[in-house]
Image (spheres, rainbow, N blue to C red):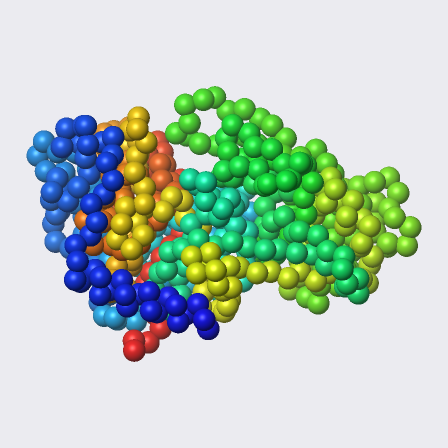
Amino acid sequence: MKHAVKRGALALALATSALATPFSTPGVSANETLPASTVLKLSNLKVVGTPQTPTPGITRTEYSGLDGAGPWKVNVVVIDPDLASVNLKGTFGTGLGTSQKTTEMLDGLTTTNVRKPLVGINGGFFDGNVKSPAGTWDGDLNGVVIQGGKLLSEAVRGKGGKPVSTSLVLQHGRPYITELSTTLTINPKGSPGVSRTLDGINRAPGRASHCERPAPGDTDETQNTDKVCIDTSEIISFTKEYGAPTPTAGLIVVPNDPDAAVPPKTEWVSVDKGFEVHLDATETVTECFDSQKEAVTGSGCTTEDRGGNSVPPGGRILQGIGEGADWLRAHTKVGGGFDLPETVTDTRFNDILTLDPSMYVTAGGDLLLRNGHIEFTDPAGGGDKDPRTAVGTDHYGRTVLVTVDGGGDRSSIGATRGELATFMQELKVLDAVNMDGGGSTTLVWQQALANTPTDGNGRERPVGDTVYAGPGGYPRV
């Protein structure tokens, strides 16, 4: 595996560098003009109580602000797979089509108490603003999601002008932070040379949120003021992990963010009733539903609107709108089929990933550190002090989870992303990524909520996914 060799060599080089030389000086931040006591850094914090180690390899240290500094409530969890056999994975709970509380996701992993995760944090950014007529909220995760080696969500165009978003790869008990791209294609079986791009996996057709900019050359795609890309012509694939009925044209957008200062507004995702195709485990068409008054002659399709169906066991569902619906309509016939080749590329090394059951990936936000160097500094106007969640890895291969509380009660003032990057650097982290924050910031410790989320009265917010660790995992080497 070429990529494994490169990454192993890189890890060794980083370890040598980290032990031999100091970390680089962070870039100048607007926060340097603030009083020192308001900037999150180790010298402004004190340890609360005694660090907790419920099992070898997992240790939690809680910090608060020194007198006159902060105030802060900061948690740092270090996971060391060399001290014990611990797992490190991600989960999206009951399905990608809904959001859940972190505590609920972790509790649902097993009914055996001794096997339940010991620590978990909220994961990546997600679209929790899409509501079905039945009143359920969509939990579309924004970026690459892989569970047990299966690709479940496509890459999005990343922040800061990057072509793709940052990804947290969890494999063999250790994290790896990189940028991943995806190439998705749909090909009719038996029709060489006829293919089309598959636009996405397990999300509402027509809507890709946390999207920095429209796709180059895609004249059907635009971006709204909320950094959501709206595309009137798409084909989306759904797997059983979607965990909800397929979207209908009745899906609406109702902002569901208690932290938002603006009143909610409602808008349609897509009014196109489109086309839907059901595939079995061999990717053969078993059913198809065409919203046109008369289905294509000989297709075997039923005249019916898309949506409201469950993914068949072992199979998939395809939905098309606009030109995507027209393309499916022209190439779909009951008894026919499609090939759906997928490629995931690690753009850090320009290597194609080999997906296997040991691999879990969750999407991240801004890259904070790379090789011990600051990658994110606050804008000239200063950054917002908000609750934050971050994941990092050090030169020993340990995972470092950090949550910083913040919110209305002011018991903890939060941090800017620039401060978070510098703080992770102080913890001797090499690579670090900012995860979803604000009201989503959550730390679960020994099956109980351990931080104070910002939603009303410390209420835990449903999120898209979680990163967790606990007993089990891979044997030490």
- In this view, which residue lies farthest toward the top? 263
Which residue is pictured at 82% across the width and 50% down the height? 330
Which residue is pictured at 23% across the width and 70% down the height? 83
Which residue is pictured at 44% across the width and 32% down the height? 257
Q: Nearer the viewer, residue 365 or 430?
A: 430
- In this view, which residue lies farthest toward the bottom? 477
- In this view, which residue lies farthest toward the right? 297
- Left or right: 119, with 233 as reference point: left
The image quadrant that residue 130 belongs to is: top right
Residue 215 in sight here:
yes
Find residue 128 and report its horizontal and vertical position in percent: 50, 39
Which residue is pictured at 72% across the width and 36% down the height? 272
- Left or right: 99, with 377 as reference point: right
Q: Nearer the viewer, residue 50 or 406?
A: 406
Find residue 314 and report its horizontal and vertical position in percent: 64, 64
Q: Is residue 370 above or below residue 135?
A: below
Residue 77 in sight here:
no
The image quadrant that residue 359 belongs to is: bottom left
**Total labels drawn:** 0
- Left or right: 48, with 145 as reference point: left
Find residue 337 and report its horizontal and vertical position in percent: 76, 62
Q: Nearer the viewer, residue 389 or 327?
A: 327
- Left or right: 44, with 440 as reference point: left
The image quadrant that residue 476 belongs to is: bottom left
Q: Is residue 231 above or below residue 188?
A: above
| Placement of the C terminus among the 4 image quadrants | bottom left
- In this view, which residue lies farthest toward the left? 67
